[in-house]
């Protein structure tokens, strides 16, 4: 026997009302989250990854965090390699709000849904999460429609990606990785612009390039991140070498490096906290896993 003709489960009016209630709930109980689409620069088709990724935009949209008692995952682990933070979270976003806020004709992203590998920045905790899986069938066709996406995410591990989103708190991430602090010799050429590219040609003909992330005209110190070379190998800027960039008038600036100070973020820098503790671990027990007698 067919379903009852006098009861409909997929009426357009009911679907719209249901979606309106979902959006209103997200606006009331959700958080403002920044969505960062990943730009593929040079995909490795063998391993299926893109190490030199770029994140050039950020879109603020309301999302609901399902983890009401804290982030999921294994939490903070104290291992022999240091403290590892393995937080996980699930974010809920409305499909209609996705289409209106992110998938727009005037935006660079035209995807029909969030993509795995894209990032979410949570302002209240100042953490960046990477989307690992997008669930699009929960709730499961209650009114024969699917009004939300569920984004299952893990804490993002920075790997020298380029951030140019115009959101200061997000773009600061790349300054915490590897940066080359170049002390320049005195010259009349000043006016380096943050965000422009700095290049140096080695004696072998290899061209090193990096993004200017900071410049202090008074101290002649210029900081460069996202350093790479045109031969695909790892190279460093060399002292006494000449670097070039452009100013606001697109005129070429030429300066000589007098000193180099590299800054490398230590992945176990948080362990300094534990070195000052005397009661975190009890080392007086000679056999903690044996018979206490």
Image: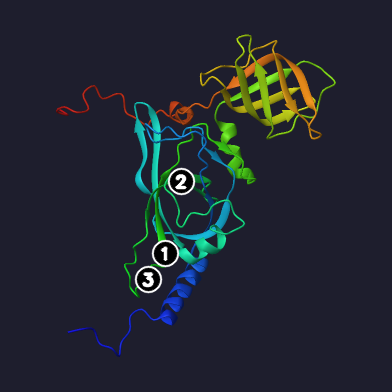
Q: Quadrant of the C terminus?
A: top left
At a point 54% along the width and 59% down the height, the residue shown is 61
Q: For residue 237, which quarter of the picture?
A: top right
In the picture as drawn, the residue positioned furthest to the right comes out as 188
Q: Left or right: 40 with respect to 66? A: right
Q: Which residue is mark 3?
A: 145
3 or 2: mark nearer the eye: 3
Q: Which residue is mark 1?
A: 148
At a point 60% along the width and 20% down the height, the residue shown is 262
Q: Left or right: 257 with respect to 84? A: right
Give the SS element for disc 1: strand
Is residue 113 placed above or below 15 in the rendered structure?
A: above
Marks 1/2: CA–CA distance: 19 Å
Give the SS element for disc 2: strand
Question: Which one is nearer the viewer's eye here, 48 or 287?
Answer: 48
Q: Left or right: 16 with respect to 194? A: left
Question: Which one is nearer the viewer's eye here, 266 or 150?
Answer: 150
Q: Quadrant of the N terminus?
A: bottom left
């Amino acid at each position: 026997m067919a379903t009852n003709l006098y009861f409909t489960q997929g009426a357009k009016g009911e679907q719209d009302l249901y979606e309106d209630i979902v959006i209103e709930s997200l606006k009331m109980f959700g958080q403002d989250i920044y969505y960062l689409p990943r730009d593929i620069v040079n995909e490795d088709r063998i391993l299926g990854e893109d190490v030199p990724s770029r994140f050039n935009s950020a879109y603020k949209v309301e999302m609901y965090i399902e983890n009401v008692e804290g982030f999921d995952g294994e939490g903070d682990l104290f291992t022999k390699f240091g403290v590892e933070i393995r937080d996980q979270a699930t974010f809920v976003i409305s499909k209609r709000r996705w289409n209106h806020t992110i998938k727009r004709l005037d935006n660079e992203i035209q995807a029909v849904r969030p993509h795995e590998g894209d990032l979410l920045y949570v302002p209240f905790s100042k953490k960046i999460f990477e989307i690992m899986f997008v669930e699009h069938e929960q709730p499961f066709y209650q009114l024969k429609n699917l009004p939300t996406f569920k984004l299952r995410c893990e804490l993002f591990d920075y790997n020298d990606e380029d951030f140019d989103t115009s959101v200061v708190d997000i773009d600061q991430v790349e300054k915490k990785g590897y940066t080359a602090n170049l002390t320049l010799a005195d010259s009349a050429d000043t006016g380096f612009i943050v965000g422009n590219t700095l290049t140096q040609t080695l004696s072998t003909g290899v061209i090193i390039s990096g993004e200017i992330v900071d410049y202090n005209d008074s101290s002649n110190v210029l900081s460069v991140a996202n350093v790479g070379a045109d031969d695909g190998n790892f190279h460093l800027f060399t002292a006494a070498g000449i670097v070039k960039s452009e100013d606001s008038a697109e005129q070429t600036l030429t300066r000589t490096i007098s000193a180099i100070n590299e800054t490398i973020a230590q992945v176990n820098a948080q362990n300094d906290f534990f070195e000052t503790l005397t009661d975190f671990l009890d080392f007086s027990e000679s056999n903690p896993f044996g018979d206490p007698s």
